[in-house]
Image (cartoon, rainbow, N blue to C red):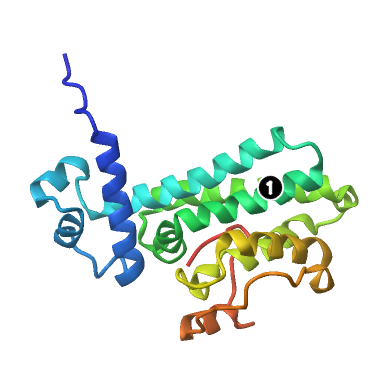
């Protein structure tokens, strides 16, 4: 009989992924070594290899699991909420909450997916397309007249444009959080600038070269992807 997994095996795998995502996000996938991951986890390299065979398997797991969680949110929320608008609002809030809890994994998915081998990249991108399609369906449900147009997907990509790059300027230690920004994004998406409620913390963002670049009109994002490099 095959030997079962030791108690705590999956918790340790999750802890390793969290540490690897933090390192990849901070210094880049290419610049991170398995030795650094082992040190960050407080493990020997031999023990680390017991959980993940190489650095690439860490990248695959980080990207695939993060986008799978987003896909799960999109699949689950519509069945629980009473009206189309509330469903879409809840999707926005839940996706932003996921980004807050997995900001390092989101940065990895956004910036390091280019290092995935073709078959792994295709699988991750297919899941991302399903996330986009799910949100687009929620947009149409909220505005049924859009069903006869080609605007559902562009509107969905505009929504993701507001939230996908928030990690480039939203300071983790600032007064604004993903939680406080979620209703602002919702108000802006549904009602435009005049609908945004002013009550809330003082704007506290960190403007960097990367955030200016991501906000530039010259920046392009694939219409098939909610996140990508």
User: Measured along the vertical axis of the image, is residue 229 above or below residue 15?
Assistant: below
Considering every residue shown, the one lying at the far right of the view is 145
Name the residue located 29 percent from the left edge and 64 percent from the top edge. Answer: 23
Determine whether, in the image, residue 222 is placed left or right of residue 186. Answer: left
In this orientation, does residue 57 appear?
no
Give the image quarter of residue 212: bottom right
In this orientation, does residue 169 appear?
yes
Q: Nearer the viewer, residue 81 or 2?
A: 81
Give the image quarter of residue 187: bottom right
Q: Which residue is mark 1?
A: 90
Image quadrant holding the N terminus, namely: top left
In percent of width and height, residue 144 lies at 88, 47
Name the residue located 64 percent from the left edge and 67 percent from the top edge. Answer: 162
Name the residue located 65 percent from the left edge and 60 percent from the top edge. Answer: 182
In percent of width and height, residue 192 lies at 81, 69
In percent of width and height, residue 210 lies at 47, 81
Name the residue located 17 percent from the left edge and 18 percent from the top edge. Answer: 2
In percent of width and height, residue 39 lies at 15, 59
């Amino acid at each position: 009989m095959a030997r079962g997994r030791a108690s705590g095996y999956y918790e340790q795998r999750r802890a390793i992924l969290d540490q690897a995502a933090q390192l990849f996000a901070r210094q880049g996938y290419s610049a991170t070594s398995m030795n650094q991951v082992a040190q960050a986890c407080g493990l020997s390299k031999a023990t680390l290899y017991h959980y993940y065979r190489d650095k690439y398997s860490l990248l695959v797991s980080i990207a695939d699991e993060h986008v799978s969680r987003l896909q799960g949110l999109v699949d689950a929320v519509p069945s629980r909420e009473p009206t189309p608008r509330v469903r879409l609002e809840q999707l926005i809030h839940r996706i932003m909450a996921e980004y807050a809890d997995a900001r390092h994994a989101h940065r990895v998915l956004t910036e390091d997916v280019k290092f995935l081998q073709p078959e792994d990249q295709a699988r991750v991108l297919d899941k991302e397309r399903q996330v986009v399609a799910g949100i687009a369906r929620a947009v149409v449900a909220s505005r049924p007249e859009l069903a006869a147009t080609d605007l559902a997907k562009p509107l969905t990509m505009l929504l993701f444009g507001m939230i996908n790059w928030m990690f480039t300027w939203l300071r983790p230690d600032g007064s604004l959080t993903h939680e406080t920004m979620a209703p602002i994004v919702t108000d802006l998406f549904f009602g435009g600038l005049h609908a945004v409620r002013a009550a809330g913390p003082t704007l506290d963002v960190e403007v960097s070269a990367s955030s200016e670049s991501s906000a530039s009109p010259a920046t392009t994002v694939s219409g098939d992807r909610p996140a990508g490099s």
